[in-house]
Image (cartoon, helix red, strand yellow):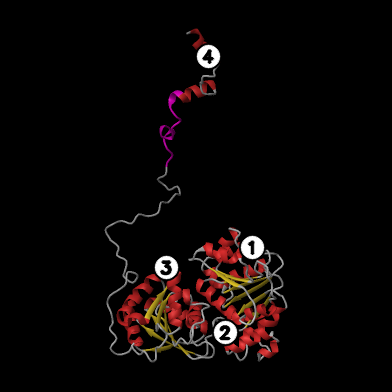
Amino acid sequence: MKTGISSFDELKLSNALRKAIDDLGFEKPTPIQAASFSVITSGKDVVGIAQTGTGKTYAYLMPLLQMLSFSKQIHPRILVVVPTRELVIQVVEEIEKMSVYSTVRVQGVYGGTNINRQKDTLAQGSDIVVATPGRLYDLILSRALQLKEIKKLVIDEVDVMLDLGFRFQLTNIFDLLPKRRQNIMFSATMTSEIESLIQQFFVGTQKIAIAVSGTPLENIEQACYAVPNFYTKANLLMQLLADADTYHKVLVFVAHKRSADRLFQIIEEQYGEEACVIHSNKTQNYRVRSINQFDEGKNRILVTTDVMARGLDLNKISHVINFDTPEYPENYMHRIGRTGRAEARGTAILFYTEAERKAKDAIEALMDLKINQLSLPEGISISKELTPEERPKNTEPNIPVKRAMDTRDGASFHEKKEKNKRTNQGGSYKHKIKAKYKKSKTRGDKNYNKRNKRK
């Protein structure tokens, strides 16, 4: 989608907003920002599809802050829902930067912290609430957060939320919001599940698509290595990281938490405080501290799972290394989008084993691009040690495997004998009495009472 907007002057921003943008050093709007501004300010429901790193956050923040008037009311008027705690913190920071010359009360709420403190802060009043779905739903159910004044709903990185299993919370939040509101949704991909949400809850939706999800980012140089196993990958990574001048800010993606901890332990032995790690089992304070230290350059290497693949805008990452090949090819696009941002150059390197070759081929098919294949550097130690996940599964040939029971009647099936069909009826005496008198004999029975009188 093309627009004729080439400068912020054409957007007719308020003086306070324009001054804040000038302070941030932005010279012109990105394509998604230019295309979204007038549509969002018109009040229509909007779905924006654009690559990661193209400025989607500012694409909805600029028009929303432009329309937001001063108010002293307690309940928020804008609700922004994002998938992760880190993204909540970042969006709140961006709102504070853009509203430095105006009065905007913004509150971020997310899990892993004291909910009572968040309740107290919300009670003081806010204009914008930025939240993760889980904590938002908890605050709504406890009536600490009232949605009756919400006029604008923003769902950012909706595809990630659905991947994380937040569909239930999202649909319930939709039902609790006022019917008359503007819905704004941003995503890097469009799926049938997202389309279903749009059909169910949006009205007169205008879609803005800037780039196809699988299109490779032009300012990112890509390369790959064929590596036999985890520990050989670790040896290759350690040799690359030894060149600190070239690899001065490196984001390393792994498949899961076990790999993250295992790899971090190896890196930490040699590089010590230069490295940090993030995954969903780390505490909120630890994760925030690690992100800040990496962003500020105190840590050179950050090992992480896909929890860091979306939304976070970290400064000047020189290399993204896919230590494990992502199972879904689109996740590769989101990972490498952490580098090469704001027209800067970046490098993405992919390690893949023979078991991951199909996933690597799927990535190339999605991008319609062959990733540059590199040979392993000389001197790389090929490890024979395997992780528990890589070891072959041992099976004992002499131990028969119990098959699932087949409930269908076969040739050897026969009916039970009559005596074997009997079931426990609670004792023969009670059963006979019940059959004879049609009811149990009790102290209320007339015959029973007559007999007692005779005695």
| Disc 1 secondary structure class | loop
- Give the residue type at disc 1: Gln
- Give the residue type at disc 2: Thr
First in sequence: mark 3 vs mark 4? 3
- Give the residue type at disc 3: Asn
Q: Is residue 86 above or below residue 179?
A: below
> Is residue 4 toward the left or the right of residue 95 in the image?
right
Instruction: State the residue position of label 2.
Output: 54
Instruction: State the residue position of label 4.
Output: 449
Q: Which residues are magenta?
A: 414-429
Q: Position of residue 247 (x, y in %)?
A: 39, 88
Answer few, some or many: residues within 10 Å of disc 2's Cα (few below 14, many 20 plus, some between 14 and 19).
many
Q: Position of residue 43 (x, y in %)?
A: 72, 75
Q: Is residue 447 above or below residue 158?
A: above
Q: Which of the pair 155/20 is nearer the observer?
A: 20
Q: CA distance from mark 3 to mark 1?
A: 31 Å
Residue 426 magenta-highlighted: yes
Which numbered dot is residue 281?
Answer: 3
First in sequence: mark 3 vs mark 1? 1
Q: Is residue 213 above or below residue 123?
A: below
Instruction: State the residue position of label 1.
Output: 146
